[in-house]
Amino acid sequence: MTETTKFVEKAKACIDELGDELSELERKAKAAGDRADAWSAAQVEKLKEDWHQAKDEMDDLADRAKTEGEDAVREAKEKADRHYEALQAAVKAYRDHLDQVTDT
């Protein structure tokens, strides 16, 4: 198993976990009804779009690594890693915000 293959497998697992968390947060926002502010309702859709993009990037990276080799995807791998870290931070910020606006 190559370094990129390991990276992609781990990243996909982490992205799947974030997807599960986003689904849970979306349910929480819907359940909160009027206690959730407008930003909370809109933000989950934006995060889901970003999550889908990160997932697609991992699929593309895996395909490129197979066809072009490890060296060809080094820069893409670094970009994907930064994207995942930013997405992870955004989901955390959203979770914290949602916790604040829905706590009674």
Image: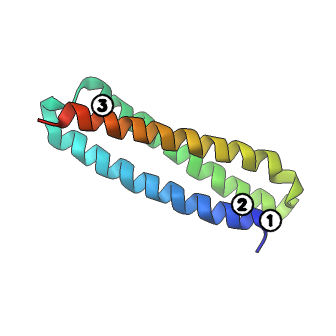
Q: Which amino acid type corresponds to the residue marked 1 in the rendered image?
A: Lys
Residue 22: percent from left, percent from top: 37, 48
Residue 81: percent from left, percent from top: 66, 47
Q: Exactly how many numbered labels are in the figure?
A: 3
Task: Check disc 1 and report the residue beneath it.
Answer: 66
Q: Check contact, mark 1 vs mark 2: CB within 8 A.
A: yes
* Vertical position of residue 18 compared to residue 99: above or below: below
Label 1 crowd bin: few (<14), some (14–19), many (20+), radius 10 Å: some
- Could one spot residue 50 in this view of the protein? no
Q: Which residue sits furthest top?
A: 38
Q: Which of marks 2 and 3 is nearer the N terminus?
A: 3
Which labelled disc corresponds to residue 40? 3
Label 2: which secondary element: helix
- Could one spot residue 72 in this view of the protein? yes
Label 3: which secondary element: helix
Q: Which amino acid type corresponds to the residue marked 2 in the rendered image?
A: Ala
Q: Is residue 15 left or right of residue 5?
A: left
Cα–Cα gap, marks 1 and 2: 6 Å
Instruction: Examine the image and state in which quarter residue 31 appears.
Output: top left
Foreground: 82 or 51? 82
Q: Residue at x 65, y 49 (%)?
A: 57
Task: Check disc 2 and report the residue beneath it.
Answer: 62
Label 1: which secondary element: helix
Label 3 crowd bin: few (<14), some (14–19), many (20+), radius 10 Å: many
Q: Residue at x 72, y 54 (%)?
A: 61
Which quadrant holds the C terminus?
top left
